[in-house]
Amino acid sequence: MSEVFEAARKVMPGGVSSPVRAFGSVGGSPVFVKSAKGAYVTGVDDREYLDLVGSWGPALLGHAHPEVVEAVRQAAGRGLSFGAPTTGETELAELIIGRVGGIEKARFTSTGTEATMTAIRLARGFTGRELIIKFAGCYHGHSDGLLAEAGSGVATAGLPGSAGVTKAAAGDTIVLPYNDLDAVKEVFASRGSEIAAIITEAAAANMGVVPPNPGFNQGLLRIAKEHGALLIQDEVLTGFRVSDAGYWGLEGRRDGWTPDIYCFGKVAGGGMPLAALAGRTEIMDKLAPLGPVYQAGTLSGNPLAVAAGKATLTLADAKVYARIDAMADKLAGILTGRLTEAGIPHRLQRVGSLMSVFWGEGPAQAPVINYAEAQKQDTSIFTRFFHSMLDQGVLLPPSAFEAWFLSAAHGESELDRLDVAIQKATQAISS
């Protein structure tokens, strides 16, 4: 892989089109994939890997599911892009609305970053306010204002989290500790009339998997409503993956509440570039052409991506989610059992079928509830574990701060193979 990586680095920054793929946090050369099928990917060196990346979430049914591929093939035969509305967009919107509560209309984009960026603009246009609250460790794409990081103190204006992001762009974002309702209340008490929205991952999965505390999301909604602000729940990653209705299906459906705006992606596009923001009519109709909030995209609602999304959501029935949940239960048991057996301090955290391991004595003592605690883990343990698994033909997300993904294509034989690999890896890093 080193030769193809070197060739890539000569013509692309870092040799990749998205930073985490470069294996920067674990070292070594990334696996360059030439094909994928079911629960496996095949590298350019013809080596097959059992895959727990799943294209970072979209491969809910497994890679190259024949019915999804056929739907895309048929769509491609009719034309790759029209720059015009299609009935497929309507049908996919109807599928999304039928699954998730509180949604009356949806707008399609090509990426999750576009969806969250538009949701922020829409919240500002709807409320006439400028400030946004986000939480440290929650990732909402790479638009300027959402790359802000927390300053000192409970609630300070964000400082730029990337070169090229101006202080002005970051300055309208207030960054707070995740799972801290008191911090949210404090900010609203002093600046509530200026805050347009709170944006949060419905369940955090970009600092490792960190579930919201009981009542956290509903508390955010209550505080926002008290002050005339909106709640945006980013389900780009969790949407239609952790249940048929995403994270809302695990919590909001049970407790009878809905956020003001949702953002979806990944599974919603079946592995093709597609994302969406959605909500009730009075908010969504502020978008152009009906309202003053502008958003556009030549490839938004692309017919190939819409076809993949429709096929994926249609096939993702109760049996699919039950199978993935069952495999996740077994994998979690294998992981915790083998790590404990080898005396490796850790904590495994889950949201539905999503899981990640926090490594070291700190996480072993108490649940990780925010980004500051997530950063205290010993990532060097994961690096050794990652490479041992890779040597055995198992591809994990190349960062300790990423979720692991299973699919409906993972079965008992894959779990058996994982058990053997995990046992060898835990023995290797504990010796």
Image (cartoon, rainbow, N blue to C red):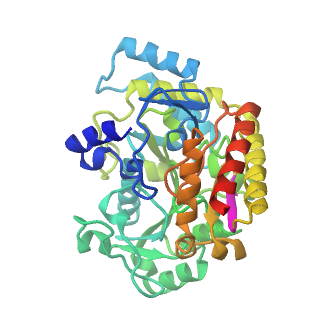
Q: Nearer the viewer, residue 112 or 364?
A: 364
Q: Is residue 283 magenta?
A: no
- Which quarter of the figure has residue 31? top left
> For the image shown, how many numbered marks are present on the structure?
0
Indicate left or right for 296 with 425 as reference.
Answer: left
Indicate left or right for 231 with 215 as reference.
Answer: left
Residue 418 coordinates in the image, percent (x, y): 69, 42
Question: Can residue 205 be seen here?
Answer: no
Task: Read off the magenta span.
Answer: 345-351
Which residue corresponds to the image point at 40% horizontal and 47% vertical from the top-left?
21
Q: Nearer the viewer, residue 292 or 96?
A: 96
Residue 254 coordinates in the image, percent (x, y): 75, 54
Which residue corresponds to the image point at 77% horizontal and 47% vertical from the top-left?
329
Dominant secondary structure, magenta: strand
Question: Can residue 380 be seen here?
Answer: yes
Q: Quadrant of the N terminus?
A: top left
Q: Is residue 346 magenta?
A: yes
- Above-or-below relation of 292 to 55: below
- Which quarter of the figure has residue 124? bottom left
- Above-or-below relation of 11 to 270: below
- Above-or-below relation of 328 to 137: above
Q: Quadrant of the C terminus?
A: bottom right
Residue 206 coordinates in the image, percent (x, y): 51, 58
Q: Nearer the viewer, residue 81 or 4?
A: 4
Residue 55 coordinates in the image, percent (x, y): 50, 39
Which residue corresponds to the image point at 46% horizontal and 79% vertical from the top-left?
192
